[in-house]
């Protein structure tokens, strides 16, 4: 098992900040019938996003704001320099999402979620899939990955692809999974300057533009990550 954290660093032993929002909701409602079940929505909780990816974080922050989740204090490990590398070397995106969430949960002992995403291209038998992050090799850039995909699809007319995100949420020590997927196609060449990763070559079927052409608010209408986050938000609120 690879060491993903620098060994000589001490992490603060934080008290678990687990809040059972459903239990609080039902306790408070039974004590005082004036409280509606929506009371849960104004109880605050801490939620940590287990990723160093700033792009993902802004997508998720904006989805939380859109859902009016001002009572959830969404934090992330983006700027935590003590965390060297978050594991994602499993064979499925489900396992990767769970490994990332567990890894961060074991350090911070708080409610946490992680996402793992794969781009599955039909003509490439589902590749890069779980290998999307490191498709062009260890330490490759977004650009290297996109180049590899465009190269492999040269002259191929079937450009169908699916973006799939799995979120693993650990709340009260229990794991919950939420999936989002979007069908689309890989364009012949890059367009757009926004977004990250494969965005410049992924065009969802519902649009004439790639994700890199769209403002974040528009990507968040259809994206794989948005679908998975919306399912998680539903779960947190009900
Ligand atoms: P991971 O979920 O961070 O492991 O992402 C796997 C690979 O897919 C990385 O190369 C990401 O850059 C890329 N990726 C993840 N989400 C998106 C997205 O929303 N748009 C484009 N590329 C993405």
Image: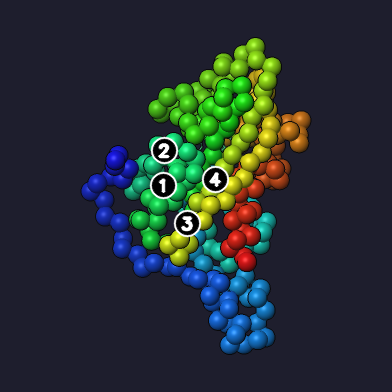
Q: Quadrant of ligand 1?
A: top right
- Taking 123 as reference, is 138 left or right? left
Nearer to me, 138 or 175: 175
Q: Is mark 1 within 8 Å of ligand 1?
A: no
The correct choice, above or below, for 52 with respect to 39 in the image is above
Q: Which residue was labeled with disc 2?
A: 90
Q: Which residue was labeled with disc 4?
A: 166
Which element is circle 3 on? Answer: strand
Q: CB of mark 1 within 8 Å of CB of mark 2? A: yes
Of labels 1 and 4, earlier in sequence is 1
Q: Is residue 59 visible?
A: no
Q: Which residue was labeled with disc 3?
A: 175
Of labels 1 and 2, earlier in sequence is 2
Q: Residues within 10 Å of mark 1 (few under 14, many from 20)?
A: many
Q: Quadrant of the N terminus?
A: top left
Q: Quadrant of residue 183?
A: top right
Of labels 1 and 3, earlier in sequence is 1
């Amino acid at each position: 098992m690879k060491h993903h954290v620098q060994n000589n660093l001490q992490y603060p032993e934080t008290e678990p900040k687990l809040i059972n929002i459903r239990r609080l909701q039902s306790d408070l409602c039974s004590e005082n019938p004036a409280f509606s079940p929506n009371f849960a929505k104004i109880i605050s909780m801490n939620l940590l996003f287990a990723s160093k990816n700033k792009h993902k974080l802004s997508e998720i922050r904006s989805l939380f704001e859109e859902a009016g989740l001002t009572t959830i204090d969404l934090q992330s490990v983006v700027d935590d320099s003590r965390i060297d590398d978050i594991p994602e070397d499993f064979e499925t995106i489900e396992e990767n999402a769970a490994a990332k969430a567990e890894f961060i949960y074991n350090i911070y002992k708080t409610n946490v979620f992680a996402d793992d995403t794969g781009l599955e291209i039909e003509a490439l038998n589902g590749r890069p899939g779980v290998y999307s992050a490191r498709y062009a090799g260890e330490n490759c850039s977004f650009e290297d990955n996109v180049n590899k995909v465009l190269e492999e699809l040269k002259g191929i007319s079937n450009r169908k692809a699916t973006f799939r995100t799995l979120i693993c949420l650990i709340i009260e020590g229990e794991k919950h999974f939420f999936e989002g997927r979007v069908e689309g196609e890989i364009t012949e060449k890059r367009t757009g300057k926004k977004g990250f990763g494969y965005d410049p070559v992924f065009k969802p079927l519902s649009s004439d533009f790639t994700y890199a052409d769209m403002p974040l608010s528009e990507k968040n209408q259809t994206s794989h990550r948005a679908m998975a986050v919306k399912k998680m938000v539903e779960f947190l609120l009900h």
